[in-house]
């Protein structure tokens, strides 16, 4: 059985069924940071911030030394040589993801949500079993530090989404009486969540409490208008109208389809010279887990175009949607992503709340996120199994430590020739090999500059390539 790590409740470690004494709360906080996910190198700086936040005035006198002390004590507690190793300015916990209850839980939820249309009874059983892995209501309960608090918020949002899915399946299977009480509790604690209220109204109506259901709808409508300036969602309005007409609303023979955004920019039809990078990118993005691929290089290298092309190439692996952003603040972009995913988030909400709702909206879905030139891509990266991200132009330090980074450089001479020929015309390029070589050299073999030069030629059929070279030389 070996070591087992439990984070869905108090942080616990068991070895061969026996609980391991993890010592002081701050040692637990260090272990928690090393578990998301295990096997990933976590820098000492990140461990310091995980415990004491980013405000250095709140740090102890020797934070790095204290981290080392906590790691040393954890090594002794966990036993097993080579389990907690130091490398390259940080530490890594050499344990498989399957040893952590969180990742088993998330895999089960993902599978259950995928089954909800084809086999709702089996999906309901799997969700109930997965949710049974929680011990109490708070993940990492009792673990101090800013990192643990952020994790708690994300996991609470994911659990809330799983509970909603479970109760929705209960209604789909005719178990409205059993679902009524938990739905009433959720509606009371989430007064603005329209999906919870839609399920609650339906359960009330099916239990013969139609007047109460309609009164609840009117109260929700007034609350949404007064607090958010919004009308209820169309699905909620339609349900209320069906109840008023005395019809028998059906939650689903099939569950309502979630939006499938497709925000990718158009693909580049004449991309050349990137076959090796495309093959490697496909390998990364079609792998299990939550892969992140970073593409970067000098200005004009075409990293953005390559990122778009790669996203189109693997689009079939992410059937639940593709999201795209190329600028703006993290909060505004997250709010836009949430709207595209069917969550009418208030853009004035804090970043932590938006991040938690983003994770919940992605849970159980396979979505690809394409980010181009975002200064801080971190909050926009998906963190649930089955989703992935392609990031163009980000600084290396802005990506997770386990991200795969591909360098995008200038084109080889023959690829530069091919790009010019595709845009300006093969015959025209073939006639002037020396001028073409000089033009490619002037452009530094960079795709963006080559494309601009070729388009200039295509727009001036009377020019030779040598004419363009002279024109560029005159302008420095």
Image (cartoon, helix red, strand yellow):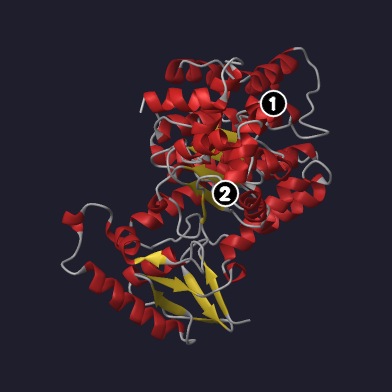
Location of residue 143 (image quadrant): bottom left
For mark 1, give the secondary structure.
loop
Where in the figure is residue 64, as x and y percent of width and height?
Answer: 25, 70
Compared with 10, 469 (above or below) is above
Residue ID at (57%, 22%): 464
Q: Distance from label 1 to label 2 (Cα)?
A: 28 Å
Left or right, 445 with reference to 276: left
> Can see residue 308?
yes
Q: In which quarter of the image is the C terminus?
A: top left
Q: Which residue is the site of mark 1?
A: 209
Q: Residues within 10 Å of mark 2 (few under 14, many from 20)?
A: many
> Can see residue 344?
no
Left or right, 53 with reference to 181: left
Where in the figure is residue 469, as x and y percent of width and height?
Answer: 48, 28
Left or right, 358 with reference to 281: left
Q: Nearer the viewer, residue 282 or 277?
A: 277
Compared with 25, 413 (above or below) is above
Residue 159 disc label? 2
Of callouts 1 and 2, which one flags the residue occurring earlier in the amino acid sequence? Answer: 2
């Amino acid at each position: 059985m070996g070591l087992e790590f439990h984070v869905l409740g108090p942080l616990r470690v068991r070895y061969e069924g026996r609980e391991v004494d993890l010592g002081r709360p701050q040692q637990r906080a260090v272990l928690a940071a090393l578990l998301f996910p295990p096997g990933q190198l976590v820098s000492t700086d990140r461990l310091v911030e995980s415990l004491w936040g980013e405000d250095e005035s709140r740090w102890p006198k020797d934070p790095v030394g204290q981290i080392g002390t906590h790691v040393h004590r954890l090594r002794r507690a966990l036993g097993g040589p080579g389990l907690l190793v130091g490398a390259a300015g940080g530490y890594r916990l050499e344990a498989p993801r399957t040893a952590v209850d969180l990742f088993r839980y998330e895999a089960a939820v993902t599978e259950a949500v995928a089954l909800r249309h084809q086999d709702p009874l089996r999906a309901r059983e799997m969700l109930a079993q997965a949710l049974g892995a929680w011990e109490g209501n708070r993940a990492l309960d009792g673990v101090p530090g800013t990192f643990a608090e952020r994790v708690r918020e994300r996991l609470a949002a994911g659990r809330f989404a799983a509970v909603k899915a479970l109760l929705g399946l209960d209604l789909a299977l005719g178990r409205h009486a059993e679902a009524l009480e938990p739905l009433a509790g959720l509606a009371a604690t989430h007064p603005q969540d329209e999906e919870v209220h839609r399920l609650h109204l339906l359960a009330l109506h099916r239990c013969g409490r139609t007047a109460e259901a309609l009164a609840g709808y009117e109260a929700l409508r007034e609350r949404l208008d007064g607090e958010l300036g919004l009308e209820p969602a169309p699905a909620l309005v339609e349900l209320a109208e069906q109840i008023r007409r005395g019809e028998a609303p059906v939650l689903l023979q099939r569950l309502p389809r979630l939006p499938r955004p497709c925000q990718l920019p158009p693909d580049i039809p004449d991309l050349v010279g990137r076959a090796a990078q495309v093959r490697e990118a496909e390998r990364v993005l079609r792998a299990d887990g939550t892969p992140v691929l970073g593409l970067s290089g000098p200005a004009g290298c075409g990293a953005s175009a390559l990122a778009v092309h790669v996203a189109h190439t693997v689009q079939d692996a992410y059937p639940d949607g593709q999201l795209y952003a190329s600028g703006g603040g993290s909060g505004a972009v997250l709010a836009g992503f949430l709207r595209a995913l069917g969550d009418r988030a208030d853009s004035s909400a804090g970043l932590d709340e938006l991040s938690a709702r983003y994770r919940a909206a992605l849970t159980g879905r396979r979505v690809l996120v394409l980010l181009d030139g975002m200064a801080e891509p971190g909050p926009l990266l998906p963190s649930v199994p089955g989703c992935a991200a392609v990031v163009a132009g980000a600084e290396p330090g802005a990506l997770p430590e386990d991200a795969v980074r591909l360098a995008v450089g200038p084109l080889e001479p023959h690829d530069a020739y091919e790009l010019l020929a595709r845009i300006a015309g093969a015959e025209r390029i073939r006639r002037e090999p020396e001028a073409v070589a000089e033009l490619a050299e002037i452009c530094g073999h960079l795709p963006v500059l080559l494309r601009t030069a070729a388009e200039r030629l295509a727009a001036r059929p009377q020019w030779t390539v040598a004419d363009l070279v002279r024109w560029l030389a005159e302008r420095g």
